[in-house]
Image (spheres, helix red, strand yellow):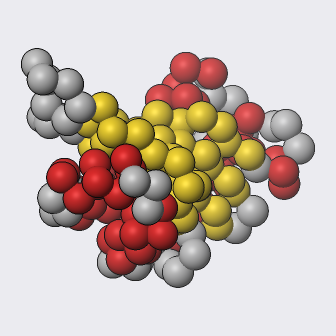
């Protein structure tokens, strides 16, 4: 996981801070997303199209328990299957991360050849609007939530 750069008294630029956050979130979720891709895409499509959100939630819980503390990742009960004749399928799952007072709302995109994590919102109430403190607490929460 990422640690804050040396000299914590220095302020990070907004671009560096955003890049650090994005990398930390993506790195924390990589193995989890790869594990989700072991599920047959047809099953995801069927569950999404027939609104079987309980089944999707169970798949998310099963995959997340290998990498994260219990309750840190959860399904937000929204998903989308993008299936077109001329492209490979894409499965979009709305998820929430919560640990140590840090909320991250994001969409995990399962696709080939590359996956993606689209962060919608990050909430860190303890930081009181201080962006450097938000980043520090976010990195700490991600690191603490991981089992390995």
User: Residue 21: x, y in percent?
Assistant: 52, 39
Q: Residue at x 30, y 32 (%)?
A: 82
Q: Residue at x 50, y 78 (%)?
A: 69
Q: Nearer the viewer, residue 61 or 122?
A: 61
Question: Residue 55, relative to residue 136: is it above or below?
Answer: below
Q: Nearer the viewer, residue 47 or 34?
A: 47
Asked whether residue 64 is in view, the answer is: no
Q: Nearer the viewer, residue 46 or 90?
A: 46
Q: Residue at x 20, y 35 (%)?
A: 89
Quarter of the image for the N terminus: give it.
bottom left
Q: Is residue 49 left or right of residue 99?
A: left
Asked whether residue 106 is in view, the answer is: yes
Q: Residue at x 13, y 31 (%)?
A: 88
User: Residue 97: x, y in percent?
Assistant: 58, 58
Extreme front residue here?
50
Q: Nearer the viewer, residue 57 or 53?
A: 53
User: Residue 60: x, y in percent?
Assistant: 40, 66
Q: Is residue 91 left or right of residue 19?
A: left
């Amino acid at each position: 996981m990422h640690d804050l750069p040396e000299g914590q008294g220095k302020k990070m630029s907004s671009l560096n801070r955003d890049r650090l956050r994005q990398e930390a979130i993506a790195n924390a979720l990589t193995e989890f997303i790869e594990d989700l891709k072991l599920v047959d895409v047809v099953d995801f499509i069927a569950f999404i199209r027939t609104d079987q959100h309980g089944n999707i939630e169970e798949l998310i819980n099963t995959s997340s328990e290998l990498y994260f503390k219990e309750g840190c990742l959860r399904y937000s009960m929204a998903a989308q299957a993008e299936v077109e004749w001329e492209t490979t399928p894409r499965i979009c799952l709305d998820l929430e991360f919560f640990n140590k007072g840090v909320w991250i709302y994001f969409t995990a995109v399962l696709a080939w050849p590359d996956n993606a994590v689209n962060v919608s919102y990050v909430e860190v109430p303890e930081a009181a609007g201080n962006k450097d403190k938000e980043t520090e607490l976010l990195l700490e929460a991600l690191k603490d939530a991981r089992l390995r």
